[in-house]
Amino acid sequence: MVREGGFHPFKGRVSRHFGDSLAPDDAYLSYYDVRLTKEDVDTLKNDWLTDNTIAFWEEYLEREELRKYPSSHIVLLRPSMAFMLMQTPDPLTLKDALPNFSRTTHIFLPINDARNVSVAEGGSHWSLLLVSVIDGVAFHYDSLTPSNYNEARLATDKISTLLNRPLRFMNLDDSPQQENSSDCGVYVCIQMRHLLLKRLLSANAREKVSMSMGGKLVDASGGRKEMLKTIEGFRKEGERRRSFSRHEDSRSSSPFAKGKNDSRSPPRIDS
């Protein structure tokens, strides 16, 4: 869940626990195609998750989990792409910007209720849409049901047009419900991982899998801590690699070595 206009209570503050010298907009970690800012990381403490934080989690699941299943054809659509899809009158005009869905079996979409395309980090609620292309069904998981019902229906219609096939929309009323007003993004991330790893990737090809999350306990607090720990682990690894690279550069007599590692750039993980 994010606040309209992108306002966050951590804006302008500096964490006492890590990154003390960083301003909210400063880069904290570069992880493949996602560049997390200090503010993105701070939202994981007890605030509404930003688009970027959810995008990091999807990138993480792709790089660390999906890559173990090379024969799978599952797409984790980024929040920005899902929003663009929902706001574009003719989704077919986005074909070149979106992944090729010709062999895709399932698509995960973080759904946001933002409507103003000119407002960064807009909207007030996150939910999760899982499209089973092979079954022709779109499952909607909303932790404040039915808050994003209309948005999820719209996204389903857009995907249906892109795929050129009908999709049956199922709003799963038994989805776990959040206990406060700020955990919706965390619920999206936790349920996305569970559905991906425990339902889709672990199922036998002939096995019929229930996509209901009814009765499942979502530990939002534990999820926040785990995501923070994951980011911190990559940041430390990025710092270690940068330190090693600087050491190697210092041993080199090349005139191009100096300045190769900008101290202002964040720790990077890209391999």
Image (tube, helix red, strand yellow):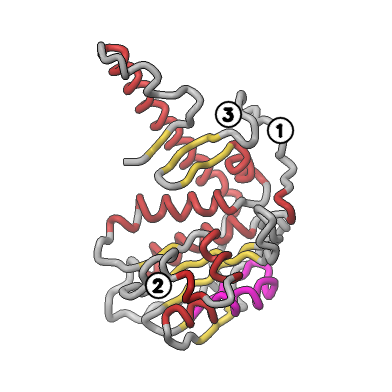
Q: CA distance from mark 2 to mark 1?
A: 40 Å
Residue sitting nearer the eye, 241 or 157:
157
Disc 3 or 1, which lies upstream in sequence? 1
Seen at 63% across and 45% down, the residue is 43
Residue 142 in the magenta stretch? The answer is yes
55 left or right, relative to 20:
left
Is 20 part of what is drawn in magenta? no
Nearer the camera: disc 3 or disc 1: 1
Element under disc 1: loop
- Residue 18: assigned label: 3
Measured from the top left, where is residue 92 in percent x and y?
47, 76
Q: At 72% across and 57% down in the image, what residue appears?
A: 180
- Asked which quadrant contains residue 41, the reply is top right
Residue 106 is tagged as 2
Quarter of the figure that contains the C terminus: top left
The residue beneath circle 1 is 13
Graded by Cα atoms within 10 Å as few (under 14), some (14 to 19) or many (20 or more), the crowding at tag 1 reads: some
Q: Earlier in the sequence, mark 2 or mark 1?
A: 1
Amino acid type assigned to the residue bearing label 2 in the image = His
Q: Amino acid at mark 1?
A: Arg
Q: Position of residue 139 (x, y in %)?
A: 52, 77
Q: Residue at x 63, y 74 (%)?
A: 151
**In this rendering, the label closer to the viewer, 3 or 2:** 2
Q: Which residues are magenta?
A: 138-156
Q: Quadrant of the N terminus?
A: bottom right
